[in-house]
Image (tube, rainbow, N blue to C red):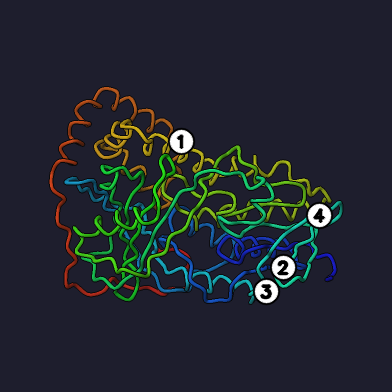
């Protein structure tokens, strides 16, 4: 058995690589990242670097070195209603297979050890260390273990006792498609047939499109049904979904009361919970990684590795405040009964709400700090709710507008090494 390391990080995706980068900034050198697969490795994801990803990359001294499509507009749709909203700054759409490999290369360049083909099978927390057993039978020990191992996190399971709950479900497919522009499409039309979430069409480098659906767990929807929803939802865009190649995966929405730490254990990224409203995980992971890295480094320095304050620290950070707000909004917007129409009509037809959320998605505003604007929107909706719901019913009754791809060139591609796209 190896000596006792300071930190083991399970998972080398954006959450694990970012946490490793943060710990390195604090001078933590005895650090090993364990990854189940080798890089480059595929990872299903929408690929939008939303939220405060630029600031997070800069704070971690990481760079966006892979090609991306800067998307400066969001197109929101429901049935016959379509509205285009300008982003506060462009959202960069990347391919995860490229981004994850780039981040791993950057942390390795700092001397951080990343061991691939090292799936973790079990862990046991002792008085002075955590023992991690790999699938090949080898055991490693560390003073602190950080779970950045996604929705199926073994660290999360240790904290929750593998409690059963319905996850968000996502299905995506990347395919060749010449889109008419670089706008990110968020299509809520499938909600009229019982899905609770949205369909997306994002532009990707090389004349491709990233398409998919996210379903909120207010009702059960299996993968075959979600594939049908995706296939039918893409028809107005002139996109045919191939019979094979789609990827489906579950994720857990962030809950401010869920266990995210225990003595010697922390979770970050999808293991701690994604954005329940949008399904976003990359920017969330990078923002949480700063809190996790700061917490672990402080614990190592002081000897207090109980991490009792970690959940509160996550909740008080900007990322935690926005996740908590989005969780509340998701419960209203994606509820199982007909009440979702009241809140969707607010989102679509209030003059300010879509702009606020576009700014939230692009990271140009912190929506949790816009309480006065939110309350003002609710007050307006109390007066206009009836008329707006009638407009929503009209939009749902109208035929879907044809949004066919054009023969225009592929979306512009940037490979600038800077972290800012604005």
Q: Quadrant of residue 107?
A: bottom right
Mark 2 element type: strand
Residue 328 is situated, as x and y percent measured from the top left of the image, at 46, 35
Few, some or many C-alpha atoms within 10 Å of disc 2 (few <14, some 14-19, many ≥20)? Answer: some
Mark 4 element type: helix
Few, some or many C-alpha atoms within 10 Å of disc 3 (few <14, some 14-19, many ≥20)? Answer: some
Work out which quarter of the rendered image holds the C terminus and state it.
bottom left
Per the model, the C-alpha gap separating discs 4 and 1 is: 37 Å
Query: Do residues under tags 4 and 3 come within 8 Å of each other at their CB atoms?
Result: no
Work out which quarter of the rendered image holds the N terminus and state it.
bottom right
The residue beneath circle 2 is 134
Residue at (16, 46) in percent of width and height: 80
The residue beneath circle 1 is 328
Per the model, the C-alpha gap separating discs 4 and 2 is: 28 Å
Residue 264 is situated, as x and y percent measured from the top left of the image, at 77, 52
Few, some or many C-alpha atoms within 10 Å of disc 1 (few <14, some 14-19, many ≥20)? Answer: some
Query: Do residues under tags 3 and 1 come within 8 Å of each other at their CB atoms?
Result: no
Mark 3 element type: strand
The residue beneath circle 4 is 301
Per the model, the C-alpha gap separating discs 3 and 1 is: 39 Å
Q: Mark 1 or mark 2, which has the lower sequence index?
A: 2
Per the model, the C-alpha gap separating discs 2 and 3 is: 11 Å
């Amino acid at each position: 058995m190896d000596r006792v390391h300071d930190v083991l990080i399970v998972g080398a995706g954006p959450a694990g690589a970012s946490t490793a980068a943060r710990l390195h900034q604090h001078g933590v050198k005895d650090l090993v990242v364990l990854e189940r697969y080798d890089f480059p490795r595929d990872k299903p994801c929408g690929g939008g670097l939303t939220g405060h990803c630029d600031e997070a990359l800069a704070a971690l001294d990481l760079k966006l070195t892979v090609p991306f499509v800067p998307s400066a507009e969001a197109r929101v749709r429901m049935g016959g209603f379509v509205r285009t909203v300008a982003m506060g700054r462009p959202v960069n759409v990347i391919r995860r297979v490229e981004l994850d490999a780039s981040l791993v290369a950057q942390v390795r360049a700092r001397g951080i050890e990343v061991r691939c083909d090292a799936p973790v099978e079990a862990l046991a927390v002792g008085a002075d260390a955590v023992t991690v057993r790999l699938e090949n039978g080898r055991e490693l020990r560390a003073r602190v273990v950080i779970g950045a191992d996604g929705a199926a996190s073994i660290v999360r399971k240790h904290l929750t006792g593998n409690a059963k709950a319905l996850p968000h479900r996502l299905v995506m497919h990347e395919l060749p498609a010449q889109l008419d522009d670089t706008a990110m499409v968020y299509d809520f039309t499938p909600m009229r047939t019982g899905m609770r979430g949205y369909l997306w069409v994002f532009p990707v480098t090389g004349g491709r499109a990233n398409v998919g659906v996210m379903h909120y767990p207010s009702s059960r929807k299996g993968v075959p049904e979600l594939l049908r929803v995706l296939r039918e939802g893409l028809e107005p865009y002139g996109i045919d979904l191939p019979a094979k190649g789609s990827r489906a995966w579950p994720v857990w929405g962030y809950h401010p009361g869920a266990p995210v730490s225990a003595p010697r254990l922390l979770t970050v990224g999808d293991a701690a919970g994604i954005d329940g409203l949008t399904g976003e995980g990359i920017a969330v992971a990078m923002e949480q990684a700063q809190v996790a890295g700061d917490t672990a480094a402080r614990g190592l320095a002081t000897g207090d590795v109980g991490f009792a304050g970690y959940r509160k620290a996550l909740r008080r950070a900007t990322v935690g405040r926005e996740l908590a707000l989005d969780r509340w909004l998701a419960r209203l917007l994606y509820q199982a009964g007909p009440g979702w129409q009241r809140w969707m009509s607010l989102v679509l037809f209030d003059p300010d709400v879509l702009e606020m959320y576009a700014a939230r998605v692009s990271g140009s505003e912190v929506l949790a700090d816009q309480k006065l604007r939110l309350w003002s929107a609710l007050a307006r909706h109390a007066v206009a709710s009836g008329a707006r719901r009638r407009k929503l019913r009209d939009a749902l009754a109208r035929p879907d507008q044809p949004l066919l791809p054009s023969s225009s060139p592929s979306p512009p591609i940037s490979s600038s090494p800077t972290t800012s796209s604005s």
